[in-house]
Image (cartoon, helix red, strand yellow):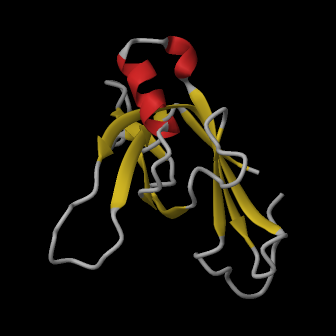
């Protein structure tokens, strides 16, 4: 559902939807940052012994999705941590679909959608707490997924 135009979209209008995790009032507490969206495709080098040229041929290998990092301000919602605990307990049905939607400036038009299949939490990092600071407490969740698609 990508919408093409002459100038790039701004990076700050986006939504994150995690299947069965989202709060009815907010999209997972409103993530402030998503990083790591991408795909890596490996290539193996191969050369036949009877090949007449002294160079290798590139053969397409497997593809993989790098880890995705989500950051948000701490809001007191424990739904993400409950998901982490379920995955720690080995519950395979806890694999989720995560959808990241980039919005146009009107915040209603979907500019680009990335769908992460079979996502699971790999790492949770709580906020750095300081009595002298005035910053927002930010938590970080790193996800692994098996496939990424753009819609």
Residue 64 appears anywhere in the view: no
The x and y percentages for residue 79 are: 52, 37
Q: Quadrant of the N terminus?
A: bottom right
The x and y percentages for residue 51 are: 38, 32
Residue nearest the viewer, comparing 116 with 55:
116
The x and y percentages for residue 86 are: 44, 20
Could you tell whether 6 is left or right of 49 in the image?
A: right
Residue nearest the viewer, comparing 98 with 64:
98
Q: Quadrant of residue 81?
A: top left
Residue nearest the viewer, comparing 64 with 31:
31
Residue with the most extreme bottom position: 7
Numbered circles on residues, count: 0
Residue 88 versus residue 116 in the image, above or below: above
Residue under the point 71% across and 55% down: 113
The x and y percentages for residue 116 are: 60, 40
Could you tell whether 148 is left or right of 137 in the image?
A: right
Residue under the point 47% across and 12% down: 91
Residue 66 appears anywhere in the view: yes
């Amino acid at each position: 559902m990508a919408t093409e135009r002459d100038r790039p979209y701004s990076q700050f209008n986006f939504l994150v939807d995690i299947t069965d995790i989202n709060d009815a009032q907010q999209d997972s507490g409103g993530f402030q940052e998503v990083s790591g969206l991408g795909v890596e495709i490996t290539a193996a080098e191969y050369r036949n012994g009877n090949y007449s040229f002294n160079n290798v041929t590139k053969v397409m290998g497997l593809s993989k999705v790098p880890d995705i990092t989500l950051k948000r301000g701490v809001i007191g919602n424990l739904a993400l941590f409950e998901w982490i605990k379920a995955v720690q307990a080995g519950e395979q049905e806890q694999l989720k679909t995560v959808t990241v939607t980039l919005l146009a400036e009107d915040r209603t038009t979907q500019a680009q959608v990335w769908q992460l299949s079979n996502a699971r939490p790999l790492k949770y990092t709580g906020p750095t707490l300081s009595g002298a600071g005035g910053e927002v407490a930010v938590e970080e969740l790193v996800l692994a997924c098996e496939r990424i698609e753009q819609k």
